[in-house]
Image (tube, grey):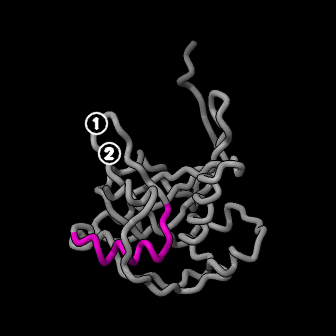
Amino acid sequence: MDNSNWTLGLNVAGVRPQDAGGVDLPTGAYEAKTIGVTLRDGKEGKAPHYRFDVEITSGEFAGAAQLIVAGSDLSKDGNVRTWRTTLQSHGYAPELLDRGQISIGATSFVGKKCYIFVKAAEGEEEYSDRRFITPERFALLAKTAPRAAQAGTVLGAPASNGTPGAQPQPAQAPQPAKGILASLLG
């Protein structure tokens, strides 16, 4: 069957071109912006997940696309912590989040400034580990990651990004990394 004789009418005005894929970034903290959030079906019996498409906004890797996933199964403590970090990364103040139940959607994130940490893949067959980090962790990493700062990929302390309830957060005194971040930096 020859399907080479066809026409298609469409409007792509104002649509961003598709990125060919994420750029392999060196390990470090990056300032970014969330471009899109979609709910994806789980495969092979796994729970659905949320896909965050983010773009690096500063430094030598400005414009590089990255993908971060957040789980939808809120019975898992790790997924709940991921969402807390994701919200704080996008400028939601801890005081607002500590008030209790909130309702969020894609508009809670799209177009907003955020901070991510990338641990570069160590082998050809591995994928890099990408996670949202809080503004406080970003500020700390900006002070303690000279390689990334020299490369222009890590900026100083963030300002409010216009998110309701967002407050500029003072940088905390440097403390040793714990938990997941310690394993990422280790």
Asked whether residue 119 is drawn in magenta, I would say no
- Tell me what residue is drawn at x 57 percent, y 21 percent: 3
Residue ID at (42%, 60%): 181
The residues tagged by marks 1 and 2 sit, at their Cα atoms, a distance apart of 7 Å
Residue matched to label 1: 124
Q: Are marks 1 and 2 in contact (CB under 8 Å)?
A: yes
| Spot occupied by residue 40 in the image (x, y as percentages of width and height) | 65, 43
| Residue type at tag 1 | Glu
In this view, the residue in front, 100 or 155, is 100
The residue to which callout 2 is attached is 121
- Measuring from the top left, give residue 61's x and y in whole percent: 32, 63
The residue furthest top is 1
**Amino acid on which disc 2 is placed:** Ala
**Is 141 in the magenta?**
yes
Label 1: state its secondary structure.
loop
Q: Nearer the viewer, residue 142 or 59?
A: 142
